[in-house]
Image (cartoon, helix red, strand yellow):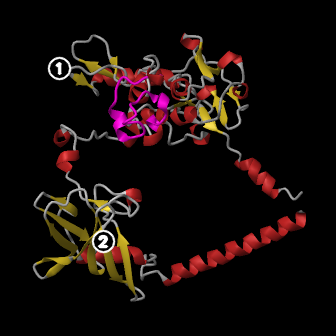
Amino acid sequence: MRTSKKIVSSVLAVCMLASTSVIAGAAATGSDATGATANPYVEAVEALDAEYTYTGNDLGATYSPEKTVFKVWSPTATEVTLNRYATGSDSEAGAAKLGTVAMEPLMDGEKKTGVWTATVEGDIVNTYYTYTIKSTHPKSGTSQTAETQDVYSVATGVNGRRSMVCDLSKTNPAGWDSDKHVLLDKATDSTVWELHVKDFSWDTASGVSAANRGKYLAFTEQGTTLNGEGQLATCIDYLKELGAVSACRICVVEVEGHSELLPACSTCAEDGMVIHTDSRPVRDSRRTTLELILSDHPFVCPTCTRNRTCELQKLADELDISMYYDFYGNPVAPLRGTQSQATEDRSGFSIVRDSQKCIRCFRCVEACDKIQSIRAIKIKESGFETGIVPVMGQSLADTDCVNCGQCVRVCPTGALQVHNDTVRLQEYLQDER
């Protein structure tokens, strides 16, 4: 066993030295006069951008009942052919080839734009197409030919192999033209649900109609319940029920006509509301609330697994809350009082609980209860004694926890984290036994 490990270690060492030599050699031969490493791919892209520019927004298939205009940007191509099909794949009923059309370069005066175009007369809605593109390799000079779907298309056939000609005026829902994307200052301020479209409603118990089950249209159905019994909400209604617990009070806003600040996460918007999100009372309230949270929080940021990704840390920076230092140089918060009793639970297979870093936002409880329906953790006590603990006073390992990691995903601090076995693994690899 010891001999085998030594042989493997020697081979790996030789491979690493060889790869280092190759990289160093490549860097030496690919550097310019300033010593910067030249990237041939970057240079090729920059050359294409400088030579071929197209500012139009009509790439793809532009449909009308009278004709459809096809445009594709392929500046290195020497020949482009439009291939037309009746269906999205050859295995579908009615599959047939509808012919080919030679595409022509789109010129800007006497200069090529890199765009190839073709026009097909008549109404060809709901048919499919691909491009056959011939080009010459920029390095070897060899000729290359490939058939591909249109990267600018808005719909495709089976497995995305063929693009589809669409009449968007018939597919867009009512009010689509006035729909606007909601943009936030920071992507981390968004609440994003990631799910599988089919799995979301495919089960017969989902309460979704058979016609829409497993499809995008399932997201349009409201009032769905488990087995259609009218008790437990499913699908979109279930996501709405998860809502927000408004426990931390950091997101308070000032609403004209209300004497108190209201939590934005759980206050329903109403017509005519005038809301102030960054007024002096709002900022003062948020600062005080955050200082109270920090008063019972350890300052071990440099060694915490959530350092620089911690929501608490980010808020302290945004609200300009500075840390102070005691006589011994230890960081302390502006407000400091009695500390709650902290416990650390490492009994779980993959999850570590550190109650000292918990801010009692209850996100983990909501995720375990309403998303996973496991209910392995719960809220205990009230007031200063409030905390999150495994059910029945057990350790996490003794509960029904399935180690799905949903609680870790929603935790804003390092109170919940995954086991880090890097050191153990290194020790095992270095063990010569």
Q: Is residue 330 visible?
A: no
Quarter-wise, where is residue 56 in the image?
bottom left
When the figure is inspected, residue 90 is found, relative to residue 213, above or below; the finding is below
Q: Is residue 178 magenta?
A: no
Per the rendered image, the range of residues in magenta is: 200-226
Residue at 32% of width from left, 77% of height from top? Answer: 133
Seen in the image, is 7 located left or right of residue 411? Answer: right
**Amino acid of disc 1:** Gly
The image shows residue 232 at horizontal and vertical percentages of: 47, 20
**Amino acid of disc 2:** Tyr
- Estimate how packed mark 1 is, as few (under 14), some (14 to 19) or many (20 or more) residues with alpha carbons within 10 Å: few
Seen in the image, is 328 located left or right of residue 143? Answer: right
Q: Is residue 208 magenta?
A: yes
Chain-order first, disc 2 or disc 1: 2
Q: Quadrant of the C terminus?
A: bottom right
Q: Is residue 69 visible?
A: yes
- Give the secondary structure at mark 1: loop
Distance between the Cα atoms at labels 2 and 1? 53 Å
Quarter-wise, where is residue 1 in the image?
bottom right
The image shows residue 228 at horizontal and vertical percentages of: 44, 22
Seen in the image, is 404 located left or right of residue 396? Answer: left
Q: Which residue is mark 1?
A: 272
**In this rendering, the label closer to the viewer, 2 or 1:** 2
Question: Who is closer to the viewer here, 377 or 90?
Answer: 90
